[in-house]
Each structure stands twice: as C-alpha cells, then as structure tokens.
Amino acid sequence: MIAVIGGAGYIGSHAVKRLLEKGESVAVFDNLSTGHRWAVPDAASLYVGDLRISEEVDDFFKRYKPEAVLHFGGKSLVGESVEKPMDYFETNVTGTVHLLKSMAKFGTKKIIFSSSASVYAGNDGSLLTETDAVGPKNPYGASKYMIEQMLDWASKAGDLKYVALRYFNVAGADPSGEIGEAHAIETHLVPNVLKAALGETAHISIFGTDYPTPDGTCIRDYVHVGDLIEAHLLALEYLGRGEDSAVFNLGSGTGFSVREIVDIACEVTGRDIPVELGPRRAGDPAKLVASSEKARRILGWQPQRTEIKTIVEDAWRWHNKK
Ligand code: UFG
C-alpha cells in the first residue's frame, strides 16, 4: 500500500493514476481544499483528512499502514505565501511534523517529498545543482526547505529514508486528457496563458518586464507532470534498494521566459493571445533553471514529454476537454 498525501491535487492525482496502472494499491489523504474528489479514481481509497489535525493523520496511518508515502500535500502558491506566511508554515511544516510522527508510530519508513526549486535563491549563468546554496525568496520556498531539513534530521535520528525532489515548474497534463491542472484560483503561467487563449479570461498578465533577463521577463524551467511522476516511481525503487536518502532536482535544463511561453502557446493553439504588461509579483526570482544530471545518473530518470511544445500541447488538450 502506497500513501499519496495530497493525491486529489494536480500533481498527486497524476501519481495515483500511474501507481494504479502499475498495479499498486493506493490510499489518498487529502482535505480537498484545492484537490478534487473526481480526480481520485474509485480504485484508490480516499481518506478526507487534514494534515494540520494530527488525530486525522494518525487515523489514516492506523487504517492503511502504508509501506511508503508520496507527500504532495500542502499549500503551493508563491504569491499567496508572501501574503499569508503563517498559513504556509502551519500546513506545510506543522502538517509534515504530524505526518512524520504518524509514520514513525505506525512503522512507515520511506517518504518521497515534493520539494521545490524555490528553495534556491535563483541563478545567473550556470544551471542549478543540488549542492548550490539555498536561499528561499518567499515563505513557500522557506517551508519546503524547512521540511527538507526536518527529513534530514529525522533520518539521522531513526530509520526513516527520504528522497526530496526539487521540482522546477511543473506543467502539462496526462496525455489521455482525463486529468490535468484544475485549480479554482489559477495562478500558474501555462494554464493562465491557455485560459486567455480560450477566451475564459480577457488576457494574460505578464508580471514584470524589468528583470535582468534578455527580454525582461522571468525565466523558468518547465517539466512535464508525467515525467515528474516517473521520477517518483524511480525514487521509490531507489529507496527500495536500500540506497541512502538524497535530494534531486527535476527540471529540463532549459529555461523559457514568460514572453517565450506566450509565443509558444500562440503557436500551439493557433490563436492570438492578448497580453497585458504588469508589475512584478512579490517573491519571484528572475531565473530558475535546473541541472537534473544527478536524477538522470542516479535514478536513471529519462524525461519523455519534457519538451516545451509537448508540455503546452498536453495542457491545451486538457483545457479544451474540461
Ligand atoms: N506569471 C505571469 N503571469 C501569470 C502567472 C505567472 O507572468 O499569470 C509569471 C510569474 O511571475 C513567474 C512565471 O510566470 O515569473 C512562472 O510563474 P508560475 O506561477 O507559473 O510558477 P512559479 O515559478 O511562481 O512557481 C512554480 C510553482 C511552485 C514551484 C516553483 C518553482 O508554483 O510550487 O514553480 O520554480 F516551487
């Protein structure tokens, strides 16, 4: 039994689908605050619970006694975290304290944690590697880094083994078009550009045109959600072989500016996408681009759909079907 915390959300639901395809039994823990009941297939068990309530987390572990945990649960919006930092520390950090305590209590020893590129301060020239200095620029990134540290100390104190995966910008959707990114309040660039292409919003706002980048807009590294999930399965196998706890970046090694993403979306959709230029959004580093050489070398990760056009095409298929 694999526990998927946050399994009703965008990334978690892709993990659940893939685990079920592999024949695993899956128990989802989710408070459905941003996730959706419909995103959890009937073949998985769904426990509606909140990470902030330790009794609910305990109850979940007591019921399912999973052998491993994929931890996608938590709040994940950079801008919101700047406005409401305590919400982020409460859900992400305190929630993970509860999770780790329940795991210890019920004998679950392996966890794959969704960390983030936002633990880094940003990069100038070269690609970010796992040994580069961290320096979160917003409470969301700080909460993710605190959790990485908690995992490390917990692993030193007991028999917990962890893999922290530092995601860069996750986008795209399952090629089936059955599941995809569906946040009630959408803040992410790729879905927002596509919503503007569909006419669901009047335009795409570009947040900041005065960054020290070639076209003045922020540069990010986009990774396909399907490839990201494959890295989780490889990380589970890695821990299953008894390997040491570790941290891996998951990105493509190629950065795209906000303007470039809009241009690619125009090409993929065949539509003109109205653009509005706006001020910077708080907490955004100018550039985040990963080296994923370590994940390729040690986990054997080989992204298949992490090509920016494929990512936008898969997301477009999902947005058209919704
Ligand atoms: N952006 C816009 N307009 C929008 C939305 C975003 O210009 O409508 C810009 C942002 O300012 C940023 C870039 O597009 O420069 C990407 O923004 P996203 O909100 O799509 O993604 P973030 O880079 O802020 O954050 C995402 C995830 C985090 C993760 C981070 C890692 O939300 O969980 O990637 O870089 F940690």
Image: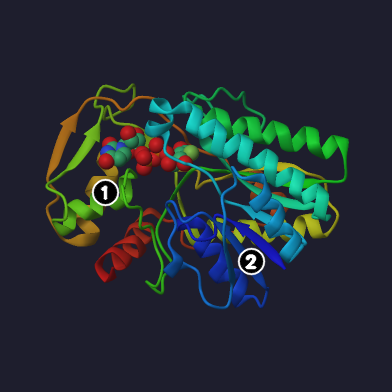
Ligand 1's image quarter is top left
To which residue does mark 2 refer?
27
Residue 306: % across, % down: 46, 56
SS at badge 1: helix
Residue at the spot 19% in from the left edge and 29% down from the top edge: 278
Disc on the earlier residue, 1 or 2: 2
Total of numbered circles in the picture? 2
Asked if residue 117 can be seen in this view, the reply is yes
Identified by mark 2, the residue type is Ala
Location of residue 30 with respect to 179 vertically, above or below: above
Colouring of the image: rainbow
Tell me the quadrant of the picture where the C terminus can be found.
Answer: bottom left
Tell me the CA gap for discs 1 and 2: 31 Å
Q: Nearer the viewer, residue 251 or 116?
A: 116
Disc 1: CA contacts within 10 A as few (<14), some (14-19) or many (>=20)? some
Asked whether mark 2 lies closer than 8 Å to ligand 1, one says no
Identified by mark 1, the residue type is Asn
- The label number, if any, that marks residue 192 in the structure image: 1
Location of residue 151 with respect to 239 vertically, above or below: above
Residue at the spot 68% in from the left edge and 73% down from the top edge: 24
Which numbered mark, 1 or 2, is in the foreground of this view?
2
Residue 83: % across, % down: 38, 26
Residue at the spot 68% in from the left edge and 49% down from the top edge: 55
Asked whether mark 1 lies closer than 8 Å to ligand 1, one says yes
Q: Nearer the viewer, residue 4 or 86?
A: 86
Whether residues under marks 1 and 2 lie with C-beta atoms below 8 angstroms apart, the answer is: no
Residue 268: % across, % down: 24, 60
